[in-house]
Image: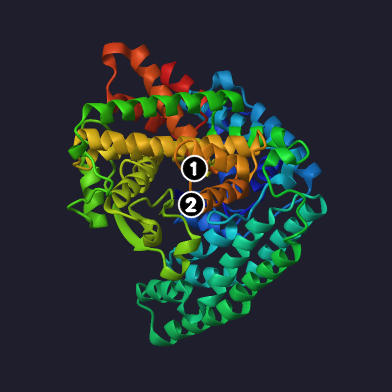
Amino acid sequence: MRKKISLLLTVTLLFALAALASCSRGSKSADAEFEAYTDNLFCQEVSSNTISLHYTLENPSDYGIDKAPVSFGSCSTDTAAISASAENALASLHAHNRAQLSDKNKLTYDILDNYLSTSLDEAGYVLYDEPLAPLTGTQAQLPVLLSEYQFNSTGDIDTYLTLMTKLPEYFESIIAFEQAKSEKGLFMASYSADDIIDECNAFIKMGDDNYLYSSFTERLDAMKLDKADYDDYVKRNRENMKEYIYPSYKKLADSLKALRTTGKNNNGLCYLPDGRDYYELVVKRETGSSRTVNELKELTQSQILEDLTAMQQILTSSSKETFSNAAPSLEDTDPTSILSNLKSKLKGSFPDPPDVSTEIKYVQKSMEEYLSPAFFMVPAIDSTTNNVIYINQGHMPDDLSLFTTLAHEGYPGHLYQTVYFQNLKPDPIRNLLNFGGYTEGWATYTEMLSYYYALLPKEQAALLQRNTSVILGLYALADMGIHYDGWKLADTVSFFRQYGIEDANTVESIYDLIISDPANYLKYYIGYVEFMELKKEAIDKWGDSFTQENFHKKVLTAGPAPFDILRTYMFQ
């Protein structure tokens, strides 16, 4: 997964848009006016919280941003204000005449229009959203984002230390948000709350061994400070951990404990008032697909059938000696070397990648249970040279998993897609709009390709790839079954049993994750299948002129977008 700046359940983009006056009508061309508008929008949005600003821009002053307030932002429960802001945001965008824009700006316009329209559709469901979730919620992301907060000057260190002192008020806003959810009968399932409480307590329990201590001194070491300043910074960081960070996590855990039994629903979203309608919106947002939920079910079932048929053909046409139950071992198990190998496989099938460096880091052992298997830290848009991929060794069962995970996070996955797009110098606002179906779908699509890069026998690679695709497809069907059709745990166990997955504890874990993070699996799987459908369409329409490299270049050049817009761009 990409570790995106999704910490904040805010509507700052909408408020920023609403605050923008209609563009001045002078001698500027339509394109110049539109670009001034999006630049202004970008600066207002990226300045809305310190994490977003620091992770997006290494040099904010180059964008005219000099004195942004130090803040994590806050959660909002004001549905009326959010709806009004969304309406004003669209009106502000629609003040520009799309027909007069360049093709590049038309694409930006269409993507913004889609993004804001989706936000308006969801505005009435603010309290259905969830900033906290096992593995992917704020409580899990925040420590990693703080540990990777880069120090390029002493000013950055001072800002970081000030930011730490703002965590209590940010967590207070999350607690108030959860209390508002509770009052409306929308609080999370009790077992989801238990998982998050456990995460918070595990983080606190690390004490002096917490990576927020070691990562801080590592960043200071690179600054070449004099001893007095160095010691003072270390002291302030230690004090802030004890006075602000740990107490904030303790209060969050205690507040969730007090609320844990107040939820009215321990099952899918469809059991909430208007829950199915809300789920349809979540699916649209998360996948970037315009297909209905029922159409997505059919698409998923069709792909699963295709994969199972291919697997059956492989198994019946190959000797038993070709396969074994043991996971395949690879000769090269060094992550840096694997990344280099994967990068070399791009030639001929993908456009040349920009020249960047990548550092592999490992999740602290005490937090392995509570973080994703791996994640790519998205670099600042004005400094893509140095990149970081985290590997969670607690979720890496074998050599092939490491290989395909590095393909997903690195080449040709997230790292490659991100730095390639940013190297094209797109409109800055494009970097703030999150389209998980595109980004996770691309990474999953390239992960599937990587099985054929792993120097395995062709039949074995195909069998393993198809099997992975089937498993993801089953998760996707379960997500839709649980949240749209109302499957309960027993229904989910029965569903997976049909496919030979009979361990009830495993299925219960899957069920709990799907309950706590609706449509999360869909953005991976549906995004992947939409790319496969897009490729089939390209082969059909381009005929003999189709090449893998041209297809991939078109997709990468368009950048993150909903699939309907991407399809129009590719075949116009």
Secondary-structure class at tag 2: helix
Q: To which quarter of the image does residue 255 belong?
A: bottom right
**Viewer-nearest residue: 363 or 49:** 363
Crowding at dot 2, Cα within 10 Å, few <14 / some 14-19 / many 20+, comes out as many
Position of residue 534 measured from the top left corner of the image (x, y, whole percent):
42, 23
- Is there a contact, CB below 8 Å, between mark 1 and mark 2? yes
Q: How is the image coloured?
A: rainbow
Image point (31%, 52%), residue name: 402
> Does 534 appear above or below 284?
above
**Viewer-nearest residue: 97 or 23:** 97
Position of residue 130 measured from the top left corner of the image (x, y, whole percent):
66, 50
Image point (62%, 72%), residue name: 165
Residue 431's mark?
1
Q: Amino acid at mark 1?
A: Asn
Q: Amino acid at mark 2?
A: Thr
Position of residue 58 measured from the top left corner of the image (x, y, whole percent):
44, 56
The numbered mark, 1 or 2, whose residue comes first in the sequence reads 2
Q: Is residue 542 left or right of residue 94?
A: left
Report how far apart the C-alphas of labels 1 and 2 lie in the structure.
8 Å
Crowding at dot 1, Cα within 10 Å, few <14 / some 14-19 / many 20+, comes out as some
Q: Is residue 519 visible?
A: no
> Does 382 appear above or below 359?
above
**Viewer-nearest residue: 133 or 189:** 189
Quarter placement of the C terminus = top left
> Does 85 appear above or below 108?
below
Position of residue 429 measured from the top left corner of the image (x, y, whole percent):
53, 40
How many marks the image carries: the answer is: 2
Q: Identify residue for label 2.
A: 56
Q: Is residue 239 visible?
A: yes
